[in-house]
Amino acid sequence: MNSPITLALSKGRIFDETLPLLAAAGIEVAEDPEKSRKLILATSRPEVRVVLVRASDVPTYVEQGGADLGVAGLDILLEHGSAGLYQPLDLGIARCRMSVATRADFDYVAAVQQGSRIRVATKYTQIARQHFADKGVHVDLIKLYGSMELAPLTGLADAIVDLVSTGSTLRANHLVEVERILDVSSRLVVNQAALKLKRETIRGLIDAFAQACTKTT
Ligand code: PRT
Ligand code: MG
């Protein structure tokens, strides 16, 4: 019997977009997380199980060995720091971009050129700090945990840094994307010790995922 393997996924787009990659590795997940309250899901391969965790908890689970592998967005990995994780593959799933957005009546370019201090609300303070430091722009960062779009509308901030995919959330709130910071997709992350101890099983999974994502992307 192969070594048991635990894969950490978050519910929603990452789970949904990882399913076809698992299928390519011959793994069917036994239950639909939207219909069940279970946090540990069995699969069609007895040695492989899936644990459902919050997207921002995936790096912690994998780093600390609560899971052997996981799938996490580049946004999450940059915010969390990923020095302790082996990252063999960009899966090309859950694609979006990290951008700066403002109200249409805020002149971001002029504010940057004039060297004004810009108030920026975001959940992604590490990425935002790095981005504005690289540009030499002075910012006051305001940490939020949700609904960043509200901040410029209420006068809490001049700008936000958030993920954008279709742009419809920004449009619905009369915000405009003024700068693209980075392209985001999800990565496979692997626990360093598990890679050594369960090398064959994990290598098999990495290879199957790699083949599947070159077919679909
Ligand atoms: O939702 P929860 O607070 O539990 O956690 P989470 O938001 O971290 O998880 P989830 O499942 O929403 O996102 C998981 C990963 O998907 C993120 O870490 C990203 O790498 C990736 N991803 C891809 C996105 C989006 N696209 C995306 N559009 N994550 C979030 N969004 C949000 C965005 O924050 C904004 O509120 O969707 C809204 C914008 O979408 P559009 O289509 O209107 O532009
Ligand atoms: Mg979300």
Image (cartoon, rainbow, N blue to C red):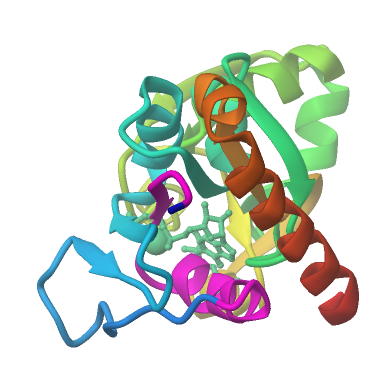
Whether residue 118 can be seen here: no
**Which stretch is magenta?**
2-26
* Image point (51%, 75%), residue name: 27
Residue 217 in the magenta stretch? The answer is no
Q: Quadrant of the C terminus?
A: bottom right
Task: Say if 192 sits above or below 25 in the image.
Answer: above
Residue 139 image point, x, y percent: 61, 18
165 vs 190, nearest the viewer: 190
Q: Measuring 38% from the left and 47% from the top, which residue is drawn there? A: 4
Number of callouts: 0
Estimate the x, y position of residue 181 in percent, counting from the top left: 78, 41
Q: Residue 210 occupies which quadrant of the picture?
A: bottom right
Q: Is residue 14 within the magenta segment?
A: yes
In the picture provided, is 42 more to the left or to the right than 199? left
Q: Tell which residue pokes out farthest to the left in this image.
A: 37
Does residue 195 appear to the left or right of 156 in the view shown? right
Q: Picture coordinates of residue 169 (x, y %)?
A: 52, 74
Residue at horizontal 62%, vertical 51%? 102
Residue 164 can be seen in this image: yes
Pinpoint residue 152: horizontal percent, then vertical percent: 47, 49
Query: Which residue is at the front of the view, 109 or 186?
Result: 186
- Which residue is nearer to you in this view: 71 or 110? 71
Q: Residue at 36% x, 73% y: name it.
A: 43
Left or right: residue 98 versus residue 148 is right
In the depicted structure, whether residue 136 falls above or below residue 51: above
- Which residue of the protein is positioned furthest toward the front in this rendering? 1
